[in-house]
């Protein structure tokens, strides 16, 4: 039976089982993949729920940071092999008219949309890797602004052995973090990188015991909440863009952005606080000599 992208999308929306949990708490939220029996595989139903929940959080001006994590023993096993197998069968069907554009639409409008939302939105995303992160799940983790790993977590490059290329921004993330040759070796070798090695390579920011994972991620949320409201929405796109810009262009962007900060109450308050601390800690002036 011939299917279109809209048919696949409609089928994914039919599932009534909740596969994503959202826990809001003031200025932050925890976005949890919640299909632990299937290792939080990014099935069609889970993916549409995840993207909808993330879009809702990013649109909420009260939410300044989001912790993305998994339930059970995995962060995410990556893409759904069953969906991949069905796509392969459809491509063999002589009556199929969409061809490779159907999986392209799913990859772009679901997986790619989630990665873009994480990277381009003003909201900070913190990956809390509670277990293995594979394939597209790994791509989402690498797209986040920070990554905290439980000691038993591993990064799994499942794409090479399946005959796929690094996907959904993974090629960019790996070559920037590792350099070309180590990224190439990572792809060809299919090496599973444990949490401590990922920390050495700069793929995660911290490694903590599993029972401290969420608290550690939430402490980063607290640090973000302490920033003046304008700071993160201005700094995040600047830092993201600077990775690709020549030094002079990055400097010029900063020169234009900095004066805008001067106009905010958050900056003025910060200056007053620092000035007051400096004044109170300054040594007293020596008494003048009598004439």
Image (tube, rainbow, N blue to C red):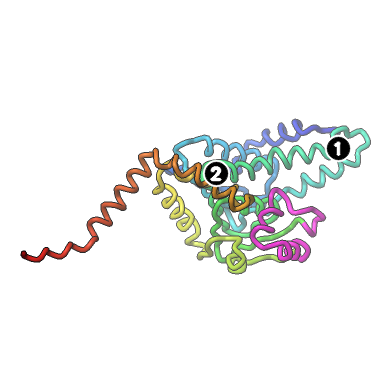
Q: Position of residue 50 (x, y in %)?
A: 61, 41
Q: Which residue is mark 1?
A: 99
Identify the residue at horizontal 41%, vertical 47% (top origin): 227
Q: In this image, 256 relative to 77: left or right?
A: left
- Answer whether residue 274 is visible to the viewer in this image: yes
Identify the residue at horizontal 71%, vertical 54% (top origin): 171
Identify the residue at horizontal 24%, vertical 55% (top origin): 279
Q: Main secondary structure of the magenta part?
A: helix
Please say if the residues under marks 2 and 1 sit with CB atoms less than 8 Å apart. Answer: no
User: Earlier along the polypeptide chain: callout 2 or callout 1?
Assistant: 2
Q: Is disc 2 surrounded by few (<14), some (14 to 19) or many (20+) residues within 10 Å? A: some
In this rendered view, identify the residue nearer to me: 152 or 149: 149
Q: In this image, 113 relative to 25: left or right?
A: right
Identify the residue at horizontal 11%, vertical 63% (top origin): 288
Q: Name the quarter where the N terminus is drawn.
A: top right
- Under circle 1, the secondary element is loop
The question of residue 217 being in magenta is answered with no
- Taking the view exactly as shown, the residue that stands out farthest to the right is 94
- Under circle 2, the secondary element is strand
Q: Position of residue 124 (x, y in %)?
A: 52, 47
- Answer whether residue 29 is visible to the viewer in this image: no
Q: Which range is magenta?
A: 160-189
């Amino acid at each position: 039976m011939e299917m279109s992208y809209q048919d696949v999308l409609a089928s994914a929306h039919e599932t009534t089982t909740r596969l994503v949990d959202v826990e809001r708490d003031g200025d932050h939220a925890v976005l949890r993949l919640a299909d632990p029996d299937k290792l939080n595989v990014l099935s069609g139903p889970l993916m549409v729920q995840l993207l909808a929940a993330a879009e809702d959080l990013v649109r909420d001006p009260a939410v300044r940071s989001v912790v993305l994590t998994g339930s059970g023993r995995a962060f995410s096993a990556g893409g759904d092999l069953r969906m991949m197998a069905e796509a392969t069968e459809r491509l063999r069907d002589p009556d199929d008219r969409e061809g490779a554009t159907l999986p392209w639409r799913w990859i772009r409008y679901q997986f790619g949309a989630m990665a873009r939302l994480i990277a381009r939105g003003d909201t900070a995303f913190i990956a809390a890797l509670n277990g293995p992160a594979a394939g597209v799940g790994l791509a989402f983790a690498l797209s986040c602004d920070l990554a905290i790993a439980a000691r038993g977590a591993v990064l799994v490059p499942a794409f090479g052995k399946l005959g796929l290329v690094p996907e959904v921004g993974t090629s960019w993330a790996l070559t920037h973090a590792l350099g070309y040759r180590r990224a190439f070796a990572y792809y060809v070798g299919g090496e599973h990188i444990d949490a401590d090695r990922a920390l050495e390579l700069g793929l995660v920011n911290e490694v903590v015991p599993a029972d401290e994972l969420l608290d550690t991620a939430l402490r980063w949320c607290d640090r973000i909440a302490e920033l003046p409201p304008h700071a993160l929405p201005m700094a995040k796109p600047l830092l993201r863009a600077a990775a690709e810009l020549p030094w002079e262009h990055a400097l010029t962007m900063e020169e234009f952005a900095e004066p805008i900060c001067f106009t905010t109450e958050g900056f003025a308050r910060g200056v007053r606080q620092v000035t007051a601390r400096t004044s109170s800690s300054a040594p007293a002036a020596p008494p003048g000599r009598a004439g």
